[in-house]
Image (spheres, rainbow, N blue to C red):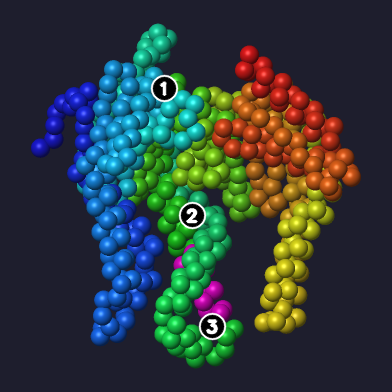
Amino acid sequence: MKRQHVDWSVPQRQSWAALFIILYKMLLRILRIFWPLLLYYIFKNKANRFDVLEAMIVGLSVISLLGSVLEFLYFRFFIQGDDLIIKKGFITKNTISLPLDKIQAVHIEQTWLHSLLNASRVSFDSAGSESIEVKIDAINKAEAEGFKRFILDTKPQSSSEELIPVQEDVIIRLSGADLVRLSISANHLEAFVLMLAFFVSAFEQLKDIFNLEYMRFISWVYQFGDSKGAVLLSGIILALMVSVIISTARIVFRYFNFTISSSRKGYSIHSGLVNIQEKLVPFKKIQFISWRANWIRKQMGLFLLHFHAIGSDEVNEKMRVKVPITNDDMIPVLLQQYHPLLPTGTLTALRIHNAFIGRRMLLSGLLPAAIIGAGLFFYFGWNVLWLSVWIIWSGISAWLFQKKFRLWTDHRALQIKRGALGREELVLRWDMIQSVAVQQSIYQEGRRLATVKLYTAGGTVTIPYIQLHQARAIANYALYMVEARSK
C-alpha cells in the first residue's frame, strides 16, 4: 500500500526496488569482466574439477554482491533544515550535504527496470557544480514526484520568483514522421564501427580461452564461403544491416515522445520509450550552444542542438543534452534565452589559414597511413597502397573544413560555422569563458599562426590556424571579459 504522506525530515531508505537495481548493475559488471571465463566453464570438459581460479571468481562475485546489499542498507536521505542530506557507506562513512537553495534542477529517470518495479531514479543538479552530485537510485515513482515538488517548494526563493507562477510552454514536440527522418539520417557508420570493434575484441578474448575451438571455427568460416573475400563481403553486408537496425532503434528509444518546454527557470526535456527521462536545463548553467548535422541531415534540414551546460562536458556523453531540430526556425527560439544569432551579414568573418590543409593532411592522413601500411605490408604486400585513399580523403576533408570555417564576433558573443561534409555552428558568450590559451607549434611559429582554445565549464571551443595577431586579440578580449565578470 502506498504512503499518502512522507515526512522527508525523517531519514528515508530507498525503495526495495533499489536493491534489485543495485544487484542487477553489479551482476552486469561481473559478467562484463568475467564472461569469457564463464563461457570456458560452461563448455569445458565436465570431468575437470573446480579449480582455484574459478573459486576466486565465485568468491569475488559473492563479496561484490554482499557489498551491494550493504550499500543499499546503509543509504539514507532526508531534509534537515535547508539542506538535503545523503548518508551512505558501511566501512567508509560518507555524508553529503547539499543546500536546497543551490539546487537548480531535479531530474527524474526511469529505465525499463525502474518501470517494471514502479520506481524512479532522482538526481540533483546544483549551482556551480560540474556534475550531478547526488543521486538516489530508486524510490517509489509517486514519491519521487512528491519529493521533487517538496524540494522545489521548500528551497528558499527570492521575492520575485515567488510572485511569478511556474508555467511551461511547449517549444518542440516530435511526431512519428520526425522520428522516421531522424532514424533514416542517423550515423549508421558509427554503429557499424562500434559493433565491429566489439566483435573483434570478443573474438580476441575467446581466442585465448578457446584456442582449439577458435581455430576450428575460423576454418569452418573459410570453408563455408568460396573464398576469403566472399566471406569478408558477406560479413560486412550483414554487419551493415545489423548496424542500421541498431542505430535506428537507438534513435527511436531515445527520442520517442520527445518534448521540450520553456519556463522561467530553464528548458524541461521529456523523452524516451524504455528509459524515460525528465531533465531540466537551467538557463544559468548553459555555457554555450551548438547545433550540428551530418551530410544527410543537412540535406533534410535536420540538426541536433546541444546545450553545453555545466557538467555536460565532452567526456560524459550521458550528461549532454541533445535536442533534435526539424525546422531551422526553431534554432533562434532556443537561443533566445542565451544569446540571439549574430548578424553575420553585416560582420566581417575571420577565416583560418590555408596552411591548415597541409598540416591536417600530414598529421591525420599521411603519418597514420604510413605507420599502418608499414605494419600491414608483410601480410598484404602492395595492397596497402589502398591506404592512399585515406590520405586523399583527409586532404579533401581538411580543404572543405578550411573553406567553410567562419568566425564572427561582436562585443557580447562569438559565432562559429564549420564542418567538412556536414555542418556545425555554435554561439558562445564572452562572459561564459573561464580561461583562454594561445598555442603555437613549431610549424605555426614559422608562419606567425596560432590556435586559440576557449575554456568554459561546459567544454572547450577551438579556433585553429589563425593569424597570431588575431589570436592575441581574441585572447585579450576574452581575458578582459573574464576579469570584468570577476569584478
Q: Is residue 440 visible?
A: yes
**Around disc 2, counting alpha carbons within 10 Å, would you say few (fewer than 14), some (14 to 19), or many (20 or more)?**
some
Name which of mark 3 and mark 2 comes first in the sequence: 2
- Queried whether the magenta region covers residue 196, the answer comes back as no
**Residue type beneath disc 1:** Lys
Q: Nearer the viewer, residue 341 or 368?
A: 368
* Residue in the image at 28% along x and 69% along y: 55
Estimate the spatial distance between the alpha carbons at disc 1 and disc 3, rounded to whole Å: 59 Å
Residue bearing the label numbered 3: 231
Q: Give the magenta part as a residue range.
A: 231-243
Residue bearing the label numbered 2: 183
Q: Nearer the viewer, residue 425 or 117?
A: 117
Residue bearing the label numbered 1: 102
- Queried whether the magenta region covers residue 237, the answer comes back as yes
Q: Secondary structure at mark 2?
A: helix
191 left or right of 258 in image: right
Count the marks. 3
The location of residue 156, given as percent across then percent down, is 36, 15
Question: Do tag 1 and tag 2 residues touch (Cβ < 8 Å)?
Answer: no
Residue 134 drawn above or below residue 44: above
- Magenta segment main secondary structure: helix
**Around disc 1, counting alpha carbons within 10 Å, would you say few (fewer than 14), some (14 to 19), or many (20 or more)?**
some
